Amino acid sequence: MPIALDVTRRHFLAVTTAAGLGHTLLPGALLALATGASAQTPAGKAAAADAAEEKLLPITVEMIEQAAAIAGVHFTAEQRKVMIDNLTGQRDDLVEVRKLALPNAVSPSLVFDPVPPGAVLETGRKAPKLDPAPHIVSIGGEGHDVSEAGLEQLAFATVRQLGELLRTRKITSTDLTKMYIARLKRFDAQLHFVITLTEERALKQADRADREIAAGKYRGPLHGIPWGGKDLLAVAGYPTTWGAGGFEKQTFDYDAEVVKRLDTAGAVLVAKLSMGALAQGDLWFGGRTRNPWNPKQGSSGSSAGSASAVSAGCVGFAIGTETLGSISSPSTRCGVTGLRPSFGLVPRTGAMALTWSMDKIGPIARSVEDAALVLAAIYGPDGHDLSVRNAAFNPDFTQDLYKLRVGYLKSAFDAPVMQEMKPPSETLAGKELEAYNARVAGRKAAFARAVYDAQFNTKALGVLRGMGLNLIEKEMPKFPFGALVPMLEAEAAAAFDELTRSGRDGLLTGQMPFDWPNQFRVARLYPAVDYIQAARARTLALAEMTKLFADVDVIVTPSGGAQLTATNLTGQPAVIVPNGLRGDDAPPPPDTGDGALNNAGGPGTPVSLTFLGGLYGESKACALAHAYQQKTGFHLAHPKL
């Protein structure tokens, strides 16, 4: 950069900073306005987009005025004239940075840390304290090996049950692995949950597990257990597609850290499971992953295949990820147990990055106990993911529950209230009246569904009180958590910057306004200053959530609502458990079309309940959630495929 221009830029920064403006405009907004390349360049024209970027249009006062309007700020005509040279230099800097190789695996130099000042984390690791080992006599009979015909009946067994059968050599990992692979192949045509089978790798791992167990070298409760991984985890020798069109043949020559740790535990990877494209929803390049309880419904996402495959009895457990509901939502939809750990507990090395300050990796399983065993195998620092803290996860299912301080979000359990709707005018007629009546009918239908589902929440509180627990009323802080979500979208747009600029975002299956391609484009116009302001506001949000958990160990809540956004932004863990099935009298879904976006809920589908813990308080949340599962048995139900 010429020295004169650099001096001018420094002077400009000093003046505008003193005036309280700083880098208020997002330079990308100007770049979008000043280039001949559209943000929606058709797929396959990346070279044309690059060429257009090299021929940037001169920045004008009119462009600055338009960009300022997008950013929600105002500059006078004279100020806009003075800004031109400095913004041109700033844009040149952007272009230089864009020339650098910044693959998805490169993280920002800033690391998010949700731990409040003065907090002391438990760091000493202890062996999990579990319930007595399960004893299975219903399959194969007392003292007999499990027959080939009976092996299929183990499809819905828990990890603890399968682990005991493997440890005592009543079954082999090889036979179990073949059974699950056969089920994956059989039900994939209906549920669309497999992207890549890892059959060759799996059979080698299973054979090794059998030989080690036979030689008395038992590695622990995951030894020989077949599992599936969300296809954002790198596995050497196999594609890692991120569920996205244009990435179908992408490969890496290394394994993700979570995969390595599960290999060390002796678990057997049988499949790379589907995920919504670039970790959004349940729609991927191969179709929409389905809910085993109602295959006309999507499984929700973005850990779509992980939840669906566990629910369908096609893997012993699975690994999912969550940024803003991607474990919670599909676990709810598919009636399985999800464990979203605290931010910074599990290393994300070798996993696709969506948002560096919010992504979390966790297990999806059939029981809390299973999920805890998996989390115990994958958590802890690896020396590469700098967000991971040296905090311990020591599950203890033998602890005295009466010593736990348990809260519940009272208003979230209150009976739904129908808000009155008034027509905007007394003279509505024709299409306007029809549209208004349709809105009223939709609101009434949604209210009927909310009233029906509320009974499950009410019963859950009754069960918990019946367990002798004193529930403390809590309410979410009055804080605009949702206003911080654009931070997520900005980080995601940065993670896939080249995808947007090249026009290859047109290869993604979803192209609706709420899909990533459009959200990435919108995020380009989110001002850098406002991103930092949101990060500062996030510090206040952390303080508010710290106060919420100051006098409780666990908070019970319905699985949706404001808590989902808040806890993802501030890093608290969540355990999501099945909480029953809707009956035949349940109101129908908003849309019963095959694969329709609003086809959710309705007769015969699961509901869930969530147990929140304080930061790095997974063990207490797991203890209470496990006790609730043992009391209710909802996790034992499975779909009849």
Image (cartoon, rainbow, N blue to C red):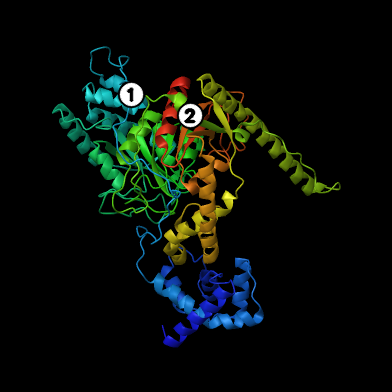
From the viewer's perspective, tell me whether residue 303 is left or right of residue 162: right
Residue wearing tag 1: 154
x and y percentages locating residue 243 in the rendered image: 41, 49
Q: Residue furthest right?
A: 427
The x and y percentages for residue 346 are 35, 45
> Is residue 466 depicted above or below 231 in this figure?
above
**Res. 640 visible in picture:** no
Residue 535 vs residue 559, the one in the foreground: 535
Task: Give the x, y percent position of residue 592.
Answer: 59, 36
Label 2 and label 1: CA atoms lie apart by 20 Å
Labels 2, 1: front one? 2
Residue located farthest toward the front when viewing the structure as drawn? 118
Please state, as top left, top right, bottom left or bottom right, where the C terminus lies in the image. Answer: top left
Identity of the amino acid at label 1? Leu
Label 2: few (<14), some (14–19) or many (≥20) C-alpha neighbours in 10 Å? many
Rendered location of residue 249, percent (x, y)? 33, 54
The secondary structure type at the circle numbered 2 is strand
Whether residue 65 is visible to the viewer of this picture, yes or no, is: yes
Q: Which residue occupies the foreground of this view, 193 or 160?
A: 160
Q: Which residue is mark 2?
A: 578
* Residue at the (36%, 32%) spot, across then down: 395
Label 1 crowding class (10 Å Cα cut-off): few <14, some 14-19, many 20+? Answer: some
At 51% from the left and 75% from the top, the residue drawn is 35
Circles 2 and 1 in contact, beta carbons < 8 Å: no
Q: Residue at x 58, y 23 (%)?
A: 584
The amino acid beneath tag 2 is Pro
Q: Is residue 432 left or right of residue 380?
A: right
